Amino acid sequence: MRADLHIHSDFSNDGKSTVEEIIEAAAAKGLGCISITDHNSFGAYRLAKENGKVIVIPGIEVSSKEGHILAYGIDREIPRDMSIKETISAIHEAGGVAFAAHPYRWWSGIGEKNTLDNDFDGTEARNARSTVSGNRKSESLAMRIGKPVSAGSDAHTCQYIGDGTVELPDDIVTWQDALSAVMRGNAKPSSSDRHMKSTVCYGIKSIIEWIFRGFRKM
């Protein structure tokens, strides 16, 4: 079973696709499981959880003070702008697990030192919107840490759903089964990479959006 564990809907302020569109696209692309990990919003899960087409792991991408953190298996929204340690603690209190998102991503990754210095439950080893170098370093870091890994497309439109996935056992029935498989280390990550032209466009877009947000990070 292929699972894309990093997707954004229009509940993210930079997401373009509705929850319904995401479910349809994921099913059409043969995915058995997804996690809609919107920026600081848990709203999409309430719409997606009983769709009858793909398994949906509850998730969110939290903006900590130092960068983005993926939370899986939570039962509530996690406040933004806390320290990494506070964010991880809040995720655990919400019944979830905390993964360092795209740690080498300029602008929103928490970086290697923060990933190593904090008690994350796992690392996002591959992300389709990260560069070749960023993904290579993330995979190496994840191996060095030796904890569970995730991967995802980081899709903000349906076009890119499935560009990053983990391969999970085919006998999974519930999101709890899927997350348990990830946490047991039964998740093989793979993804495409973002190349120079799109990286430059991303940088320009990020700066413009940052200005319009009043110089506040997402």
Image: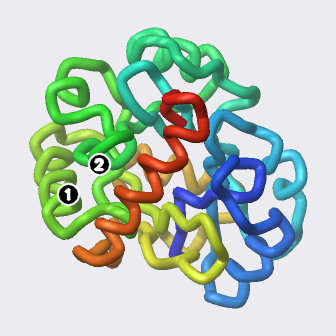
Up the image or down, 149 lies above or below 129; here it is above
Return the x and y of residue 85 as percentages of the image width and height.
40, 12
Q: What's the residue type where badge 1 is placed?
A: Gly
Q: Residue at x 64, y 72 (%)?
A: 157
Q: Residue at x 43, y 19 (%)?
A: 65
Return the x and y of residue 168 as percentages of the image width and height.
47, 68
Q: Nearer the viewer, residue 9 or 182?
A: 9
Tag 2 residue: 105
Return the x and y of residue 81 as percentages of the image width and height.
53, 17
Return the x and y of residue 94 as percentages of the image width and height.
66, 21
Up the image or down, 33 lies above or below 213; here it is below
The residues bearing labels 2 and 1 have C-alpha atoms spaced at a distance of: 7 Å
Q: Badges 2 and 1: C-beta atoms under 8 Å apart?
A: yes
Up the image or down, 205 lies above or below 121; here it is below
Question: Tag 2's secondary structure?
Answer: loop
Q: Which mark is residue 134?
A: 1
Q: Quadrant of residue 1?
A: bottom right
Up the image or down, 211 lies above or below 3; here it is above
Q: Residue at x 57, y 29 (%)?
A: 214
